[in-house]
């Protein structure tokens, strides 16, 4: 590694550990928006995943395939849809959410919902339906019976949460189109990395990339620990 790259990495670490306000403002926007989007989407998506796994109704096949298709739509297309919804001439224009964090949250909700629904449906499908029927027969409420199944499936459901969060916290297209990449308002980690790289400010881009790398390591080690505890031990 030449001295120039070494200097850039050292500068990136200084930006992080000196609590540079520009860097940490970007990190704050990114996490606030993505965590809010995940929190607002989580419960309804899990319930829909449960319904698709356990219920039988007309159109179930269509809804399942629609959800799976939505997972593969590029985020920039979702950003375009969100932009058209939130622009002044759009159906949600009166909300005035375009180029705001609320608009970004809405866009990221549209991105993470299909991931949560599809992965939770797959997890619930793996459960023996007799466990659900037995719980209901023994007098458990609908909510308690669902909670009991969720506890058994904590690892795959946590994997769904991590996958959804990873998809929204790293996406660029939707955040750029709906948020507008406004400093101290809607500029998040991915859009800032794209901007700073285009400007040639690699130190800040590296610093923000390190934040995403550390987050990824933490999430993966946590999941690995949970997966290890869930696996039966051999004697």
Image (spheres, rainbow, N blue to C red):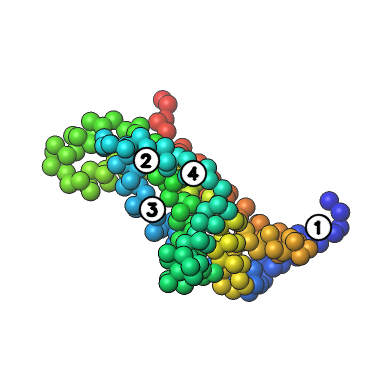
What x and y, as percent, mark residue 46?
A: 35, 47
Residue 221 in view (yes/no): no
Separation (CA) of disc 3 from disc 1: 41 Å
Q: Residue 94 in the image: x percent, y percent?
A: 42, 72
Q: Mark 3, residues whose alpha carbon is within 10 Å: few (<14), some, or many (≥20)?
A: some
Along the polypeptide, which appears first: circle 4 or circle 1?
A: 1
Q: Nearer the viewer, mark 3 or mark 1?
A: 3
Q: Residue at x 37, y 49 (%)?
A: 45
Image location (x, y in percent) of residue 143: 23, 48
Q: Which residue corresponds to mark 2?
A: 63
Name the residue beneath numbered marker 1: 6
Considering depth in this image, is 217 or 74 the residue closer to the camera? 74
Q: Would you identify the image quadrant in which residue 127 lies?
A: top left
Question: Which label lies toward us, 3 or 2?
Answer: 2
Comparing labels 4 and 1, the label whose residue is closer to the camera: 4
Mark found first going from the N terminus, 3 or 1? 1
Quadrant for residue 195, please give it: bottom right
Q: Earlier in the sequence, mark 3 or mark 4?
A: 3
Residue 194 visible, this angle:
yes
Location of mark 3 (residue): 42
Contact, mark 1 vs mark 2 (Cβ under 8 Å):
no
Disc 3, disc 2: CB below 8 Å? no
Kindly identify the residue that appears in the image at 61 percent across and 71 percent down: 182
Which residue does the image show at 37% across and 37% down from the upper left? 62
Dots 4, 2 in contact, CB < 8 A: no
Label 4 to label 2: alpha-carbon separation: 13 Å
The C terminus - image quarter: top left
Q: Which mark is residue 71?
A: 4
Do residues under tags 3 and 4 come within 8 Å of each other at their CB atoms?
no
Q: Residue furthest front?
A: 89
Structural distance between the alpha carbons of marks 3 and 4: 15 Å
- Nearer the observer: mark 1 or 2; the answer is 2
């Amino acid at each position: 590694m030449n001295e120039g790259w070494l200097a850039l990495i050292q500068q990136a670490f200084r930006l992080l550990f000196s609590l540079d306000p520009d860097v940490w403002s970007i990190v704050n926007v990114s996490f606030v928006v993505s965590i809010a989007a995940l929190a607002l989407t989580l419960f309804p998506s899990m319930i829909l995943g449960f319904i698709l796994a356990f219920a039988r109704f007309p159109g179930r096949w269509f809804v399942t395939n629609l959800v799976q298709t939505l997972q593969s739509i590029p985020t920039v297309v979702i950003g375009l849809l969100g932009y058209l919804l939130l622009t002044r001439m759009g159906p949600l224009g009166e909300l005035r959410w375009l180029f705001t964090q609320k608009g970004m949250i809405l866009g990221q909700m549209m991105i993470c919902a299909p991931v949560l629904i599809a992965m939770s449906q797959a997890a619930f499908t793996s459960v023996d339906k007799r466990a659900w029927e037995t719980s209901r027969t023994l007098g458990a409420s609908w909510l308690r019976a669902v909670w009991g199944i969720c506890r058994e499936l904590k690892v795959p459901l946590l994997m769904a949460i991590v996958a959804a969060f990873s998809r929204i916290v790293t996406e660029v297209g939707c955040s750029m189109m709906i948020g507008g990449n406004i400093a101290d308002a809607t500029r998040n980690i991915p859009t800032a990395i794209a901007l700073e790289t285009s400007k040639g400010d690699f130190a800040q881009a590296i610093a923000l990339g390190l934040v995403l790398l550390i987050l990824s390591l933490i999430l993966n080690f946590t999941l690995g620990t949970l997966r290890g505890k869930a696996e039966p031990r051999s004697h």
